[in-house]
Amino acid sequence: MVEDLLFGLEDEAKARLTELVRRWGLLADLCFSDLLLFVRDPDNPARVVVVAQVRPATAATVHQVDMVGSVFSKESAQSIFSSFSSGGPSFQERIDQAGTHKVVSQAIPVPYEGKIIAVMVRDFLLNPQRAQGELEATYVSLFEKLAKMIQHGEFPYSNDDVVETPRVGDGVMVLSADGLVQFMSPNGVSAIHRLGCRSPRRGSGLTELGLPLLGPAQAALECNPVLDEIERKGDIVVEFISFPLFDRGSPSGTLVLLRDVTDLRVKDRLILSKDATIKEIHHRVKNNLQTISSLLRLQARRIDSDKAKQALSEAERRIRSIALVHEALSREVGEQAPMGKVIDSIQALATESAPQGVEAEFEVIGDLGDVEASIATPLAVVIAELMQNSVEHAFASLPADETVGLKIKLELVRTNSVLKVTISDNGEGFPDSFDLQTTASLGLSIVRDLVTTQLDGKISLRPGPSAKVTIEVPLEIN
């Protein structure tokens, strides 16, 4: 839709048109026609504008070009203006641009709270020499029923939460108000045959066919579409979506779209199996990293050199930071890590390693959400290093017998394209002469290299009291 052309409508009215457009592929297929949605031009009420268009999958299109945004005057769109003013359907005939075919336009008003907010137009080629078969006649009659429901505010449905809609070509079944089969398309018959059901006869009941569907009755009660799935023979799965039909509020039958979704369910099972395998891999990587971390910790205890102990302890802590990401990934579906949980764990690690006399207090503002593993792992190491740097060096000159309260603030911002992390504390800060490019600190060198190379991001810091480091990382790394 062209949203700018809908700004004069209430949000509920816009939502109604959006819902109509979500479902009108079904309407186009049933009437073998192009459908256009017109609203009044907000700048000139004497004109109408096309805000949406759909072509049928069951017939050739009338409009070879995209009509969205096209403007029509009252003289060229008399049937549309007639429906806007009368609130009823209207028809108009014209010759197509090639001058070879007659095009019929059927205008159907779309009401909302007593006002006509739009007009849906069905455009189709008139071919009087071609006779309709039973299938075409049934489909068009279904469209006419749904068109009347649109005029009476009964379609689209008020609480339609069925995500998918099979196309008409997948299979159609029509039930009467008392649940008896009135029609079933050839593809529909093939689908129920694969379930091992009998061929339907006009007037057959669903139980007689071996179809234990609850959807049609439930749809009529709830006045909304209902999804059913039937699985037979261990691997055949057919999906049924029941659309209730009404005539001025009274149930008049059910349109059931059915589709063999066996291949989709097989793929779903493969995806679930793949997700389980990936989670198991992350779990094993986490366990292996924790084992390495434990070995480094044991080795540090057996070494007399303080420098060697410190180096092994830092290496052990960095490995634990990486393990935290894999632990989070082992608990989630997919390859995205919840950074909120990861940062909470990093925070706990930093608190454990605070030197004597430093009482660390953390404040986290904002959230980075779920982040791809390729970004989450190095970013977790960066955040852990900066937190650890604050814990160890914010009050490096503190006498051994004194206690100080260290406050570390994390500000997390996520936009459509960038992750921004700002870490600040109330400590002594960086000296004025500090240069991140030439620093001898291994931890800050790791931070610099991970941000600028692996994460393709930017890092800046503020010298002087109260250190502040800001990192910006693009969500799509080159």
Image (spheres, rainbow, N blue to C red):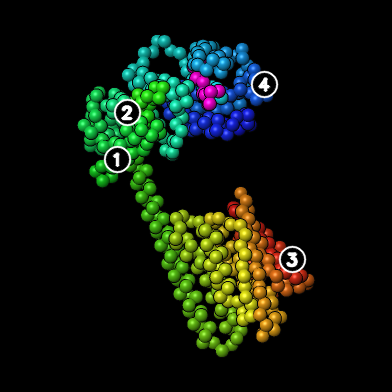
Assign the C terminus to one quadrant of the image: bottom right
SS type, badge 4: strand
Answer with mark 3 or mark 2, whichever residue precedes in sequence.
2
Q: Amino acid at mark 1?
A: Ile
With 215 as the anchor, is 76 left or right in this view?
right
Q: Amino acid at mark 3?
A: Arg
Is 7 covered by the magenta stretch? no
Q: Is residue 201 above or below residue 383?
A: above
* Badge count: 4
Q: Residue furthest bottom?
A: 304
The main secondary structure of the magenta stretch is strand
Dot 1, how many residues are within 10 Å of its Cα: few (below 14), some (14-19), or many (20+)?
some
Relative depth, front residue between 228 and 475: 228
Residue at point 74% right, 65% down? 462
Q: Amino acid at mark 4?
A: Asn
Task: Write down the residue under mark 3.
Answer: 462
Q: Position of residue 373 (x, y in %)?
A: 52, 59
Q: Measure how far apart labels 2 and 4 are at the Cα level.
A: 44 Å
Q: Measure how far apart labels 1 and 2 are at the Cα level.
A: 15 Å
SS type, badge 3: strand
Please give the label number shown on residue 230.
1
Q: Position of residue 14 (x, y in %)?
A: 56, 32
Task: Write down the residue under mark 4.
Answer: 44
Answer with mark 1 or mark 4, whichever residue precedes in sequence.
4
Q: Measure how far apart labels 3 and 4 are at the Cα level.
A: 56 Å
Is 114 covered by the magenta stretch? yes
Q: Is residue 54 above or below residue 359?
A: above
With 201 as the anchor, is 261 left or right in this view?
right
Q: Residue furthest right?
A: 432
First to last magenta residue range? 105-115
